[in-house]
Image (spheres, helix red, strand yellow):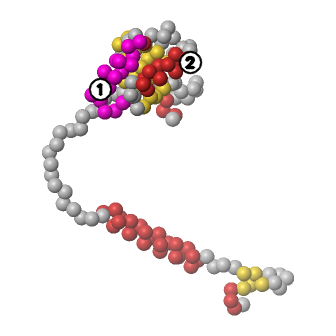
Amino acid sequence: MAGGFKSDNDGMPVAEINITPLVDVMLVLLVIFMVATPMMENGIPLQLPRASAKALPKQEPPLTLSLTKETRVFLGKEEVPFSQLRAKLQQYFRTRNKKEVFIRADGALPYAFVAQAMATVKSAGIDRIGLVTLPPDGESASAK
């Protein structure tokens, strides 16, 4: 039959789409993109200058503020009275650009004390505060 129509057993015409040309066009487009993409990544040809420079300084690890269940406060490994925490933090971060503190608080510590410590850290001008936790039982740290 002409026009791509077939008839079923009842004599009704059935329209079918021939997908072979569609597959051919898609394969041609795929080849074109595969050839054109590496050319686009090269960009503009440049001759970059050579320079000798010192290696970038290693990033210092963030400061850890540890809070024990006895409400003792440690900056790194040094114990600090809570009343002097703000001054010590300001002194520590006076010459540093990245102001970040990780708080490790004992789970038995009252929430109010942790909130006070966070407020003190924030009032010392610290931009970023992180809370250190352990993964739930049965999960490893690498599962994240």
Q: Position of residue 61 (x, y in %)?
A: 34, 28
User: Residue type at mark 1?
Assistant: Arg
Indicate whether 118 appears above or below 143. Answer: above
SS for callout 2? helix
Main SS type for the magenta part? helix
Q: Is residue 94 left or right of residue 85?
A: left
User: Which kind of residue does numbered mark 2 sit on?
Assistant: Tyr
Q: Position of residue 128 (x, y in %)?
A: 42, 31
> Seen from this angle, which residue lies furthest bottom?
2
Q: Residue at x 56, y 15 (%)?
A: 110
Is the C-beta separation of discs 1 and 2 under 8 Å? no
Label of residue 94 in the image: 1
Q: Residue at x 72, y 85 (%)?
A: 5
* Identity of the residue drawn at 53% across and 76% down: 24
Left or right of 138 in this view: 8: right
Indicate the position of residue 25 as horizontal and vertical percent values.
52, 76
Q: Name the one closer to the observer, 97 or 3.
A: 97
View extreme (front): residue? 123
Is 132 within the magenta? Answer: no
- Distance in Å between CA atoms under marks 1 and 2: 29 Å
SS of the residue under disc 1:
loop
- Label 1 or label 2, whichever comes before in sequence order: 1
Q: Position of residue 100 (x, y in %)?
A: 39, 29
Q: Quadrant of residue 39?
A: bottom left
Q: Which residue is mark 2?
A: 111
Name the outermost residue toward the right. Answer: 10
Please tell me how crowded label 1 is: few (under 14), some (14-19), or many (20+) other residues with Cα within 10 Å: few
Q: Which residues are magenta?
A: 83-100
Q: Does residue 71 lie above or below 89 as drawn?
A: above
Q: Is residue 102 visible?
A: no
Residue placed most toward the observer, 134 or 102? 102
